[in-house]
Amino acid sequence: MKKNIAIIMGGYSSEVEISLQSGNVVYENLDKEKYDLYRLHILKEKWVYVDENNGEHPVNVADFSITVNGYKIKFDCVFNAIHGHPGEDGTILAYFDLLHLKHTSAPFYQMAVTFNKRDTLSFLKPYGIKIAKSFYLNKGDQVENDSILEQVGLPCFVKPNRGGSSFGVTKVKMEDELNAAIENAFKEDDEILIEEFLDGIEISVGVIEYKHKVKVLPITEIVSENEFFDYDAKYLGKSQEITPARISSQQQINVDIVAEKIYRLLNLSGLSRADFIIVGDEPYFIELNMVPGITAESILPKQAKAAGISLKELFGNAIEMAMNK
């Protein structure tokens, strides 16, 4: 008997359109011989099931069910394709836990921690994970440029604490650019962090739960045409994403070890992607993406392909791992 799978997409953040693309990629590639698939748009203004004719059917939030042609449909599992709030920060996953509904992401607490860049860095630092020097600001704090730059130097990156797809991120090269960058980041979040610039090789590596084992995927080297791996570089072709990365065997070993260590330390599950800067032979951890992009332009699907894993296998495995928890 086929399982009913809800693919949730959209969300409440600036990444809504990217999430809709990701969700549709999942819908197109999951095995329809094995699963009955339902695209659910989780948006600020409505929660609806969108059928193949683009008809909309409201979601009953009491039990996360839908009714189509008088027939009530409940779900066996949810594939989480929401980037940002409320999918990637764990909010909607806590709701699913209350309903005893299985999902493809890590538990809601782990999702909340990893979505918060400050909390993730603070958690990992005592375990010897190398990280960039950083300075934290909350909205309303007095901004003292001298104190900030004494800590992180120039150039530096200003970024929202909770966000993705490089929305609100600025590379600051001159002191007189700092205040505008801070204001830009505060448009995305009321907490920000300012990090030192690390001069090295930018890489990204997927770590997934695959056939009941933690699997580190081939590493991708990122060469951006822009100042950094910003939105245009990620989604509009303004970068080279080279898989496998052009790094030494020692660098690869070091990245594989630390990427798996982070996944295990945080007790993660499901799909993830970790970003690093390699300085010398040492990887410096930047951030985690626990609902990584899975559009045609995204890194994780390319890494899976390099590992011999098709999108059908990648997404199907995520469902099976969730169902077997």
Image: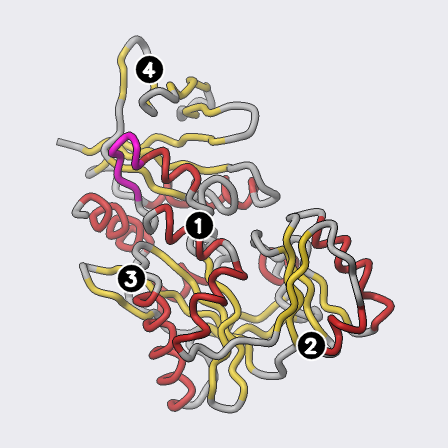
User: Label 1 to label 3, Cα distance in Å?
Assistant: 28 Å
What residue did someone put label 3 on?
Answer: 309
Q: Amino acid at mark 4?
A: Thr
9 over 206 or under it: above or below:
above
Q: Secondary structure at mark 1?
A: helix
Asked if residue 181 lies left or right of residue 90, the reply is: right
User: Label 4 to label 3, Cα distance in Å?
Assistant: 35 Å
Tags 4 and 3 touching, CB below 8 Å: no
Q: Secondary structure at mark 3?
A: loop
The quadrant of the picture occupied by the N terminus is top left
At x 41%, y 37%, the residue is 92
Q: Amino acid at mark 1?
A: Ala
User: Label 2 to label 1, Cα distance in Å?
Assistant: 27 Å
When asked about the image quadrant of residue 173, the answer is: bottom right
| Start-end of magenta stretch | 97-103
Q: Amino acid at mark 2?
A: Gln
Closer to us: 103 or 179? 179
What residue did someone put label 4 on?
Answer: 67
| Rendered image: mark on residue 112 | 1
